[in-house]
Amino acid sequence: MQKQFIKNRKGQKIAVIVEQVENQRGLAFVMHGLGGFKEQPHILTIAVAFQEKGYTTIRFDTTNTIGESDGNFEDATTTNYYEDLEDVIKWTETQKWYEEPFCLAGHSLGGICTALYAQNHSKRVKCLAPISTVVSGKLTTETANHKEREKEWKESGWRIEKSVSKPDVIKKLKWSHMADRLKYDLLPNASKLTMPVLLIVGERDETTPLEHQRIFYNALPGPKELHIISGAPHTFREDTHLEELNHLLDQWLKNNKI
């Protein structure tokens, strides 16, 4: 495992972990969600599933999250997460182990970023696994979860919550995050996602619920799968949910000969 720090287009430090495998079959980029980080159990589980199939994996902390990269969580936007994904991929192009087409996987906001990248560069992407993915800013605003806190968030300008992954961290997010998210929607260009696509969502996900995943699934033109993890919330933390996540990824990679 190699951990290094690279610079993004703004000159900010991004922490990247590369786990190379012998007889590399290809590359897989794995991206965390809003306020997440590269060592979260579900991010590790996704990476391991690809490693077990012979893929060198690249995990990284975006800027403006609670990992090791520069920036402040309060400034997090879909735009900055997406640009960091682009910059990490651009950096890997300079490495001797670089290969394309490559695989992309991401959770939640990382899901929409990886899918947007696949829409913009479809020939470079071998397969796509947006897990518990944000489908559009508009759909986010329609969830009961969002509506409950929208008024206070708008009026105060802040959404404040304790991190579950790092309980000592208080996450404060500006309302401008939502204004930025509303610029993004996977549905208009879903037809560009002709590569194998795997969607997984927790049965109890209130942030990116099953109904959103079904809308996205129905818009996909190529080989596609949608799986529901029974009893699971938006972020998979329990061992049984993580085991199922690994199993679903393993079967999908096997079935599609990826």
Image (tube, helix red, strand yellow):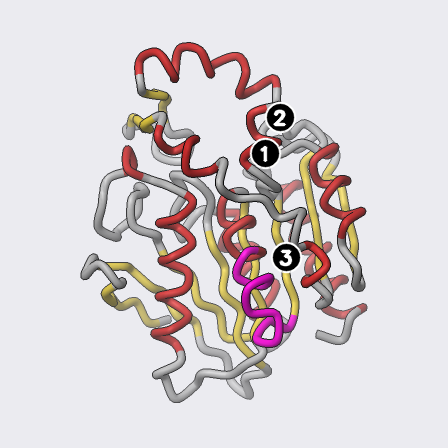
Q: Are the residues tagged 2 and 1 within 8 Å (C-beta)?
A: yes
Q: Secondary structure at mark 2?
A: loop
Report, in whole angstroms, how far the alpha carbon at label 1 lies from the one at label 3. Answer: 15 Å
Instruction: Give above or below for 192 relative to 176.
Output: below
Res. 159 image quadrant:
top left
Label 1: which residue?
234
- Residue 101 image position (x, y, % from top left): 58, 78
**Label whose residue precedes the other's in the sequence (1 or 3):** 3
Instruction: Give above or below for 22 relative to 217.
Output: below
* Disc 3 residue type (three-letter): Ala
Instruction: Give above or below for 254 relative to 98.
Output: above
Label 3: which residue?
129
- Residue 83 image position (x, y, % from top left): 37, 57
Q: Are the residues tagged 3 and 2 within 8 Å (C-beta)?
A: no
* Side of 243 relative to 66 (left or right): right
Q: Residue, x 51% and y 83% (percent of image)?
A: 99
Report, in whole angstroms, how far the alpha carbon at label 2 lies from the one at label 1. Answer: 7 Å
Q: Residue, x 61% and y 70% (percent of image)?
A: 122
Q: Quadrant of the N terminus?
A: bottom left
Nearer to me, 165 or 238: 165
Per the rendering, the mark at residue 206 is 2
* Disc 2 residue type (three-letter): Glu
